[in-house]
Image (cartoon, grey):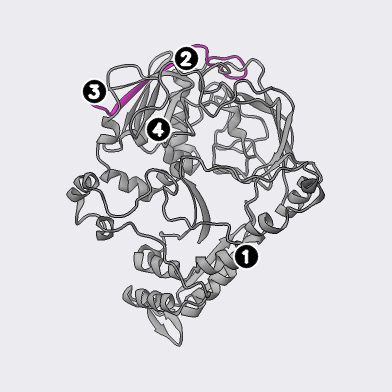
Amino acid sequence: MTILRMNRRHFLGFSGSAAFAAFLPPRAIADIPTGRALHGLSAFGDLKYGPDFQHFDYASPEAPKGGTFNFAPSSWIWNQNTDTFNTLNTFTFKGDAPPRVELTFDTLMASALDEPDSVYGLIAESATLSKDRRSCTFKLRKEARFHDGSPIEAKDVVFTYTTIKQKGHPTLRQYLAGVEKVEATGKHEVRLRVVEGRGANALLDAVVVPILSENWFKDRDFEATTMEPVLGSGAYKIGNFAAGQFIEYDRVEDYWGKDLPVQKGFNHFDRIRIEFFRDRQPQFEAFKKGNIDYREETVSKNWATAYDFPAIQQGKVIKRTFPKEKRPLMQAWALNQRRERFRDPRVREAIALCFDFEWTNEHLFYNIYTRSQSCFQGSDFQASGLPTPDELKVLERYRGKLPDAIFGEAVLMPVSDGTGRDRKQFAEAIKLLEAAGFERKNGQFHDKDGSKFALEMLSNSEAFTRIYNPFAQKLRAIGIDASLRLVDAS
């Protein structure tokens, strides 16, 4: 069991959602026009930005350029690590790469952050969907090039997708799971064919995978860790670095895509420097001293109590809560469903009943948080109330294949009495576990084979122990042998 922060693209990357994709109607891709070159693609409805758009609304084309932005990131993707790094290859499972190294690469298309799931051409000048809606042909921009001046061609796209599907990081492989075939149909034209039934999601996931140079990897092991910067094509390239200490990304002055609508108004800093700290407290101290320009706070206790140092009082530090993206953001614990006991939804529900959010929010979160209710939290796609008549038209054909609960009110997380020992919820959790086949002896649940029901929580942050420990205590109270194990971030 581990903590998980998800946005929509992460959610669609999981096998469970891939399986659910088979139930999605073909309308998702049927809304995309066929047989003509398009400047963008969207899984849901019309594109916000037309063919002649100049830049995204949230971009700042007039902002000054220059300076160094020094920060310590709190988020990462693929094999990246915010605490340290020992490789510059972020595309494989091996090693720990530095966050934001993806800034040095371009993709076929770029996501719009103010739309639920739309992408617009970056390396790809246009995208043309076939009449059978199984293939999409991308025309590549002839001016697109890697940092060494070599052009980005169809063969590079074919190499990238083929190699990552075979050898890439599992998350990247999942992005390409819906691609059945990729082929070059010209020097600057490539065709993707998607797996039947996967629809627009397969295309939208594939086009945001960074494109790599086939020639650069010709004499290099794709899966190896390396401190040699991988040849990229993005707005930044790797500058100075010291393994595990810092890395600098330098803006490419003659970046080929700087005037494209999807890039205009971004990439203002001449240099982005990331500092690495093994623990968040030294990182916070560096921020207080002015050695770091920007810091995301992820611990509610710190947000409520720690930002009272002199620089705050002098107005040198701005403390601000930023508005949410339109794309969904949520936070959750993930249960390892490869283990049989966690596959039963009654077991997962029983565990959820033992997390007293109301007590935790008051006593540990300083009433800062609102509980996540959906993988699509905060977006237009979050379920609420009963299914609408239009939704039922889609769902009815799958009645009997989908859980009955889908046809009722949207499922909400349980609300406790806030005491931290809600007996009603404990009783319901015990009832669910007994219904799932577990036997309670002397206050301890056992599997059918007589072994104890044990649950190990994994965390890579000491800061979260204050959250895990009360949760584990409540699990033990109903008969689950819960424990916490702190592990290194790597």
N-terminal of the pair, mark 4 or mark 3, is 3
Residue 149 belongs to the span the image colors magenta: yes
The image's mark for residue 131 is 3
Q: Residue at x 27, y 22 (%)?
A: 34
Residue 328 spot, x, y in % from top left: 46, 44
Q: Which residues, given as a range, are shown in magenta?
A: 132-151
Task: Give the Cα separation between the discs numbered 1 and 2.
Answer: 50 Å
Q: CA distance from mark 4 to mark 1?
A: 37 Å
Q: Where in the figure is residue 418, as x and y percent of width and height?
A: 51, 72
Disc 1, SS = helix
| SS at mark 3 in the image | loop
| Residue 9 position in % (x across, y down) | 44, 41
Looking at the picture, tell me which residue is in the foreground, 328 or 433.
Answer: 328
Could you tell me if residue 279 is visible in this image? no
Q: CA distance from mark 2 to mark 4?
A: 19 Å
Identify the residue shown where x is 73% and y is 56%.
306
Residue where numbered disc 1 is placed: 465
Q: Residue 58: which quarter of the image?
A: top right
Q: Residue furthest bottom?
A: 442
Q: Residues within 10 Å of mark 2 (few under 14, many from 20)?
A: many
As measured in the structure, the alpha-carbon distance from the residue carrying label 4 to the one carrying label 3 is 18 Å
Q: Which mark is residue 141?
A: 2
Task: Left or right? Give the position of 372 relative to 88.
Answer: left
389 relative position to 292: left or right: left
Marks 2 and 3 in Cβ contact (< 8 Å): no
Mark before the other along the chain sequence, 1 or 3: 3
Q: Position of residue 262 (x, y in %)?
A: 51, 23
Tag 3 or tag 2, which sits nearer the N-term? 3
Question: Is 141 located above or below residue 94 in the figure?
Answer: above
